[in-house]
Image: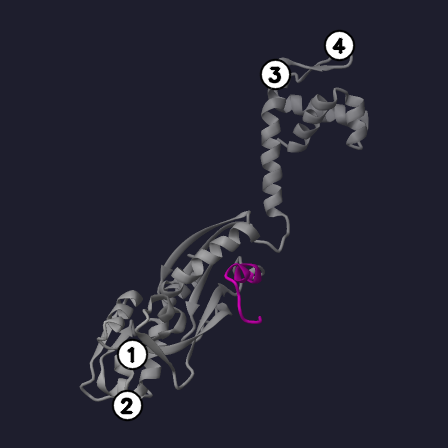
Amino acid sequence: MQTRSLRSLVKIAKIGSFARTAEQLNMTLSALSMQIKALETELGVDLFDRSVRPPRLTPIGRSIVTEAIPLLRREESLLEICRPTNTLVGRFRIGFVTTAAVRLLPKFLKNAQRKAPHAAFEFETGLSKTLQTKVVNGQIDAAVVTDADGLPDALSGRIIREEPLVFAAHEDLLANGLKGLLMGHSFFHFMPDTGIGKLIAAEMATHDRPRNAKTVMLDNLEAIMECVTAGLGFTLLPEPDVQRYRSGSVQTVPSPKHLRRKLVLATATDGTLAKRETALANLLGVTLPV
């Protein structure tokens, strides 16, 4: 059944005249009459009582008009969704590297309410490498990941922010500066097999430490910062993460190598978001020029 005929039927019911309806639809009266006749044949019912002038809707005709109105409204909604637009429309699956989700998701959701009212989002968190693989395989549409080794060829990446890495330690442990910290205290290392963990490992490899220096590996940023706050050792993390969990007794020292963590929005080069990557990046509050 073509909805065009239903639209004509609803309009006739509203106007009450075949002739005036044909005029408004820019059709001939005979063409409109044939369209309604074809609809009656398809439905197998009489929509109009033609024994009177002008023809009036039959009881079943009135019922069909009542049912057709919400159906046509839903069709309009579907067409609106499919119209070309620079905004995000539809349901999207987005991944976030776990360490960034806690900071980026609230702003993303707030922006989405205002800038993408016709979009719905599902989220998951995980390791950068795992999320990249899921984007390549089409399991998710995009992911915010740490770019430590470069993205696979099948993905394009847009930097959404750069975050300096800093050493963090209780002020009592920094009496002899960074060198004394590195030589004399335990190091709390965040997950070496993650994107950010690889950046941390690369930085630490450039510093001399005693052979018996202790390294404690943990998978929780808050736990690491609690240990640092307690004066049990030091860590190296993105500055925003340190600031989120630090107390007044914790001080930071910039990385001598000026190491920075790049958070990138990874999308499939030929995926559904290829042409709307900018719109998605805007929801994340891109802070760097693109």
In percent of width and height, residue 282 lies at 55, 61
In percent of width and height, residue 9 lies at 69, 25
Read off the residue under disc 4: 52
Residue 164 in view: yes
Q: Nearer the N terminus, badge 3 or badge 4? A: 4
In percent of width and height, residue 1 lies at 61, 31
Read off the residue under disc 2: 208
Q: Which of marks 2 and 4 is in front?
A: 2
- CA gap between label 2 and label 3 equals 88 Å
Tell me if mark 1 has few (under 14), some (14-19) or many (20+) residues whose alpha carbon lies within 10 angstroms of its own: some
- CA gap between label 2 and label 1 equals 21 Å
- CA gap between label 2 and label 4 equals 101 Å
Read off the residue under disc 1: 171
Instruction: Tell me the kind of residue under disc 4.
Output: Val
Residue 12 horizontal side relative to residue 89, left or right: right
Residue 186 horizontal side relative to residue 154, left or right: left
Looking at the image, residue 150 lies above or below residue 127: below
Read off the residue under disc 3: 60
